Structures are given as structure tokens and as C-alpha cells.
Amino acid sequence: MVDIKGVANPLFLREEELRQAIEMLFFAYRDFTGEPDAMLADLGLGRAHHRVIYFVGRNPGITVSELLRILRITKQSLSRVLSHLVDEAYILQRPGERDRRQRLLALTPKGIDLERRLTANQRERIATAFRNAGAEAVQGFNLVLHGIIDPEDRRRFDVPGIGGASPGTPRLKAGTGKR
């Protein structure tokens, strides 16, 4: 981690710069989710559906319990969204192999297609921004995001310069788009 006390010019830590960073995160998130939101609305779905589809797609065979931990929503909220996605044939549920009480989730072909369409614009936005910023800026961006994420979820990400992810944890390697 960067020692901010040792940084020669901490102007980026002034109130105005911090507020600007907060605003930029809001605008980036709004624009990042805009096109997928419109696609979802056409299907009678919302952002909660998108999050479930995304994380099930990234983690085939994920348990409902693990999905609840990632999303930090109530069982009741997830149940509503998940039931709708199962009914509409975007997600399959099957019992666990060792523990039949577990419910393992995976996308159907219809769900895979929707996830790809929802993230196409998002991938392109990020790829363009990364290309324009350069490798060093991408590393800095990953470090900043890693620092914003709550400590218990940081272990999911393998960010060069910080260390690896915890074994057995669904994770992403920063900058690779791969688990």
C-alpha cells in the first residue's frame, strides 16, 4: 500500500479533490449502467437482476449463500429476483452434490446470452478507458478500487502490487478479466 504520509504532494487529498472523486464515481456508475438498465427495462428486469446474472455468470455453480454474501442483500430480496430469473429461464438451480440442501446456480444459454449483451457496452467502456489511460494508470485505478472495497471482500481480487486472493475464494485477477 502507498504511504500517504510520505507522498510529497498530498493535494489530491484535499476536500475538493475528494468530492470530485466521489462525483466522478457517481457519474461513471450512472453511465456504466445506463445501457444495461435500458435493456433490462425492456425485459421487465432491473439492476438487482443484472447483479445476480453477472455474478452467477462469473461463478457457475455458486451457492445461494455465497451469492448472498457477495450481494449483501436479504434472502427475501434475492428470492424474489432469483425466482423471477429461474421462471424466465435465465438461471438454473440444482441441488449440491454433497449437501442436497444447497442450491447451486448457473446461467442457462438464454442467461449467458443476456449477460453477454448486458456487459458488452460495459466491457467496451472499460477497455477504451484503460487503453486511453495506459498501464500505470490502470494499476493505480485497480489499487484505488481495491482500497475502496470493504476489507473482507478485497481477498476476492488478485491485484498486482498488493498480493494474491485467498485460495478457494471466487475472485478476479485485476486487469485480466479472468478468475
Image (cartoon, rainbow, N blue to C red):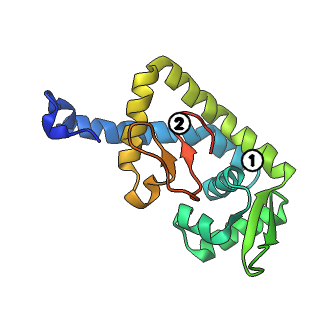
- Write down the residue under mark 1: 42
SS category of the residue bearing label 2: helix
**Residue 133, image quadrant:** top left
Query: Is 68 above or below relative to 169?
Result: below
Q: What residue type is labelled 1?
A: Asp
Query: Is 148 above or below relative to 4?
Result: below
Query: Is 80 above or below relative to 26?
Result: below
Q: Is residue 132 left or right of residue 111?
A: left
- Write down the residue under mark 2: 31
Q: In this view, does 139 lie to the left or right of 82?
A: left
* Residue at image point 62% right, 76% down: 76
Q: Nearer the viewer, residue 13 or 152?
A: 152
Q: Where is residue 21 in the image (x, y as percent from the top left)?
A: 32, 37
Q: Position of residue 107 (x, y in %)?
A: 78, 55
Q: Which of 136 and 13 is in front in this view?
A: 136
* Residue at image point 61% right, 37% down: 177
Query: Is 53 above or below relative to 30?
Result: below
Q: Where is residue 88 in the image (x, y as percent from the top left)?
A: 83, 61
Q: Nearer the viewer, residue 2 or 147?
A: 2
SS category of the residue bearing label 1: helix
- Tag count: 2
Q: Is residue 94 left or right of residue 19?
A: right
Identify the mark nearer the N-term, 2 or 1.
2
Q: Position of residue 134 (x, y in %)?
A: 45, 19
Contact, mark 2 vs mark 1 (Cβ under 8 Å): no
